[in-house]
Image (spheres, helix red, strand yellow):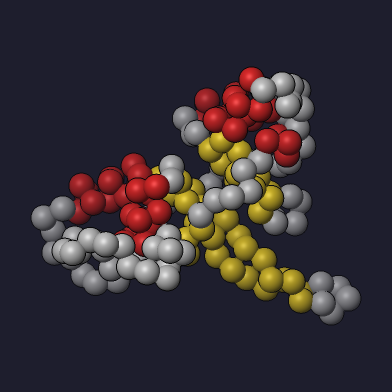
Amino acid sequence: MCEKGFLECPNQIKPWWWNLTVKRLHLSSPLTFAPFLSCQKVIRILREKAFDQAPVINESGEILGMVTLGSILSSVQEGKVKLSDPVSMVLCKDFNQVYLTDNLGKLSCILNRYNFALLVHDHTKYEADGSVCPRQMVFGVVTAIDLLNFITTHEGQDHPQS
C-alpha cells in the first residue's frame, strides 16, 4: 500500500530528504529497447552499459514492460526462450512506477522491496482521426544506488524542501 501511495511508510522519524521530489535525483536519460531485439543482443548491450534492467518500448513510445538480466536468465534456463528470440518474450509487466513529483520517501519504500522503479511522465497524444490517447513516457529507471548517491552527496548541506 505504501508503494502505491495509499499509506505512509512506517518510519517514525523522516530523514531530511524524505519529502524532496524524485526530480532532485537528476537521472540520466534511460536506455530503452525495441521489442524485436534478440535476447542475446540485449544481454550484450546491458553488459556493455553496466545495467541490469531497461524498459522495452514500441515504435510509438508505449511502455511494453521491463527486461531484466534475471528474467532472461530464468526464461533461458527453463527452456521458454532461446537467446535468438525477441526480448518481447521475456518482459516483466509488473513493475513500480514513480513520477518526477513523487517524494523520495515513496521511492525509498518501493526500493526497500524492489530492485528498481520506472520513472514516467504522463502525456496526451492526439491521433489523426481526432482520438485522444493517454500515454506514458519513460524518463528513467531508478535504483537504490541512485537514491544513495543523492543522499551521500547532499548529506550535511542545507536542504531546501522541494
Q: Position of residue 65 (x, y in %)?
A: 64, 48
Query: Could you tell me if residue 73 is visible in this image?
Result: yes
Query: In what quadrant of the picture does the N terminus appear?
Result: bottom left
Tell me where residue 7 appears, x and y as whole percent.
37, 69
Numbered marks: total:
0
Across and down, in percent, residue 106 comes to 36, 62
Residue, far bottom: 130
Q: Residue furthest left?
A: 156
Residue drawn 59% across and 68% down? 122
Q: Does 17 appear above or below 101? A: above
Residue positioned 51% across, 58% down in the render: 97
Image quarter for residue 137? bottom right
Q: Relative to residue 64, is residue 130 drawn left or right?
A: right
Identify the image quadrant of residue 160.
Answer: bottom left
Seen at 28% across and 45% down, the residue is 149
For the C terminus, give its image quadrant. bottom left
Q: Is residue 70 left or right of residue 5?
A: right
